[in-house]
Amino acid sequence: MTDSSPPPTRRDPLTEDLQWRGLIQDSTGPDELRALLDGGPATFYVGFDPTAASLHVGHLMQVATARRLQLAGHRPLLLVGGATGQIGDPKENAERSLNPPEVVAGWVGRIRDQLSPFVSYTGDNAARLVNNLDWTGEMSVVEFLRDVGKHFPVNKMLAREVVKARLESGISFTEFSYQLLQANDFYELHRRHGCQLQFGGSDQWGNITAGVDYVRRRGAGPVQAFVTPLVTKADGTKFGKTEGGAVWLDPELTSPYAFYQFWLNADDRDVVRYLRYFSFRPREEIEQLEKETAERPAARLAQRALAEELTTLVHGEREMAQAVAASQALFGRGSLDELTPETLRAALTEAGLVHLTELPDIAGLLKESGLVPSMKEARRVIAEGGAYVNNSRITEVDATVATEDLLHGRYLVLRRGKKSFAGVELLDQPSTSRV
């Protein structure tokens, strides 16, 4: 009798899985790191400085890796830098602008909320949110210089690439001291919570190894560290950036629809790496998606899988379903009536949303929206059957729309042909009064 059950899912040791995904660029000791990750539960930390009101997709590498380590049994400490966020890690080109402490404190709260969906706060390896202001804020200047600064040779600090790049133009002691604050975080987390591991992006390698060395100099440890690679795009543009700016995790800054579209529009040359970096699908599924992408790139199966998975993780199942529905409905493959006003507006904003206080005829709408360059072209498109309003084909060149045709009382979806669409929002006319 033949066994028709599917083969068991392959489960690699954590270190092997991280290496297959390309998530370990450098480490303090490969053998020691392997023993730690593949052994019993360990406590690790990763830090996020509140330099803006929201995390963006560039942070997803660290957030997803933290989730991956917790799923393997390790305990996360998610550090939000209420102290280091007031200082700022040195940039290579210029001094950072310092944000007011009350602004940073507000950002700390928002980023803590954004980190919450990625990890579990229950169980034997429950995650914990920590703030380095809790131990840094109570330290006096004398304590900082004696207890922390004493262990940092200035010649080593001057050898950092980012510091060397700033020596000619100038670097303040504030930014120069950032490395000491981050190193002290590792020591305090080791002392308070038994933290044995730190990881971060490759741009943090100097700060992270300084922390490992500082823990050793204080007679503690041993501790380990690794860094993940810098996420790049094949076309040379910066990962996490679009024409509209950064892709944020906060839905008020980047809508779930726009977030979904970011991943859906990933270049075929990039999406295979993105799957390995960000997806939590089993290795076999990812390898199958990689194979299908190579064989049928036009189907964009890998992009769709990644977009759905990450939108669900960041924004939830309902918002993901709305994003998928909008993608289909805007091109006539679903019902526009099923979209919420928020999703519809977000989708039309991405396409190009025109604001009007009164509605011209449909030819005029096509021109106002930018789908055609002139009224003559608009009438030609309508006459040839290439114009659609709310997915209904328009064939009369002088056709108009009524207010009852407006979606949610204010929106129209215009489409030229199969792929070009735009939106119209009818604004309320300002009221006038006579004195």
Image: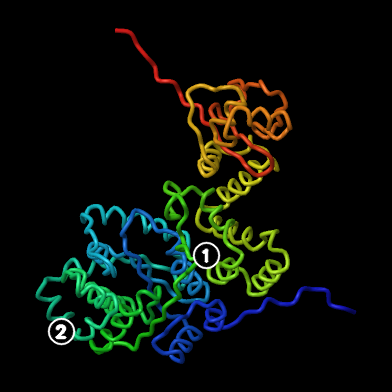
In percent of the image, x 48 and y 87: which residue is there?
A: 34
Is residue 233 placed above or below 113 in the rendered structure? Answer: below
Does the rendering let one see residue 191? Answer: yes
- Disc 1 on helix, strand or loop? loop
Is residue 27 placed above or below 293 in the rendered structure? Answer: below
182 or 185, nearer to the observer: 182
Of the 4 image quadrants, the one containing the C terminus is top left
Q: Which mark is residue 150?
A: 2
Q: Residue 36's image quarter? A: bottom left
The crowding category of the residue bearing disc 2, from other C-alpha atoms within 10 Å (few below 14, some 14 to 19, many at least 20), is few
The crowding category of the residue bearing disc 1, from other C-alpha atoms within 10 Å (few below 14, some 14 to 19, many at least 20), is few
Q: Amino acid at mark 2?
A: Lys
Q: Amino acid at mark 1?
A: Asp
424 or 410, nearer to the observer: 424
**Residue 89 x, y percent position in the rendering:** 27, 69
Left or right, 393 with respect to 182, comes to: right
422 or 380, nearer to the observer: 380
**Residue 377 x, y percent position in the rendering:** 63, 31
**Residue 142 x, y percent position in the rendering:** 9, 75
- Which residue does the numbered mark 1 point to in the structure image? 235
In percent of the image, x 26 and y 75: which residue is there?
A: 165
